[in-house]
Image (tube, rainbow, N blue to C red):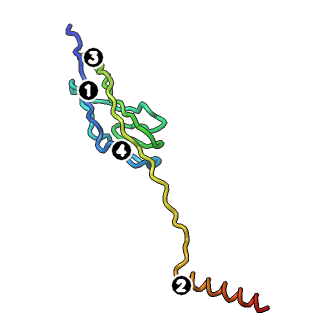
């Protein structure tokens, strides 16, 4: 009977390292992790309040740092691999800028003239 061999997981940094946060939005894990055994790697989230993972697709839950965990449980020939994690920042979008309404130069001139006329009539009365 042969003893099970050790295996490792290679999980490169994610590209891009950040995504704009969109509630319920998804993106693929990229690049994917590989196990030295050649067995399939499974993914999960160490921050379920920030993101969830199904297969190799990440679903955004909240803005923050999403920590992805790659695991491989092993089999009769391979021992479980130590988990490896990578982080992706889910960046909240800046609040939209709401312009303050302003008057054009002509409207300011007309308003000034109207106020001047009203002041003149009040003084005359």
CA–CA distance between discs 3 and 4? 33 Å
Secondary element type, mark 3: loop
CA–CA distance between discs 4 and 1? 22 Å
Residue occupying the point 42% across, 46% down: 91
Do labels 4 and 1 touch, CB within 8 Å? no
Residue matched to label 1: 9
Residue 79, position in %: x, y? 27, 17
Residue matched to label 3: 79
Between discs 3 and 2, the one toward the N terminus: 3
Do labels 3 and 2 touch, CB within 8 Å? no
Front disc: 4 or 1: 4
Residue matched to label 2: 106
CA–CA distance between discs 3 and 1? 12 Å
In the picture, which quadrant includes the N terminus? top left
Between discs 4 and 2, the one toward the N terminus: 4
Front disc: 4 or 2: 2
Do labels 1 and 2 touch, CB within 8 Å? no
Between discs 4 and 1, the one toward the N terminus: 1
Q: Residue furthest bottom?
A: 124
Q: Residue furthest top?
A: 1
Residue 51, numbered label: none
Task: Note whether 98 is above or below 66 in the view shown.
Answer: below
Q: Quadrant of residue 2?
A: top left
Between discs 3 and 1, the one toward the N terminus: 1
CA–CA distance between discs 3 and 2? 79 Å
Residue 9, position in %: x, y? 26, 26
Between discs 1 and 2, the one toward the N terminus: 1
């Amino acid at each position: 009977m042969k003893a099970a061999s050790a295996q490792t997981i290679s999980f490169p940094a994610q590209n891009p390292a950040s995504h704009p946060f969109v509630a319920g939005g998804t993106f693929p894990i990229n690049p994917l992790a590989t196990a030295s055994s050649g067995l399939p790697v499974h993914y999960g989230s160490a921050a379920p309040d920030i993101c969830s993972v199904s297969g190799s697709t990440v679903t955004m839950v909240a803005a923050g740092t999403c920590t992805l965990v790659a695991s491989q449980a092993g089999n009769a020939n391979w021992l479980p691999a130590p988990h490896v994690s990578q982080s992706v920042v889910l960046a909240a979008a800046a609040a939209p800028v709401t312009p303050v309404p302003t008057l054009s130069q002509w409207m300011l001139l007309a308003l000034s003239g109207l106020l001047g006329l009203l002041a003149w009539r009040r003084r005359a009365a």
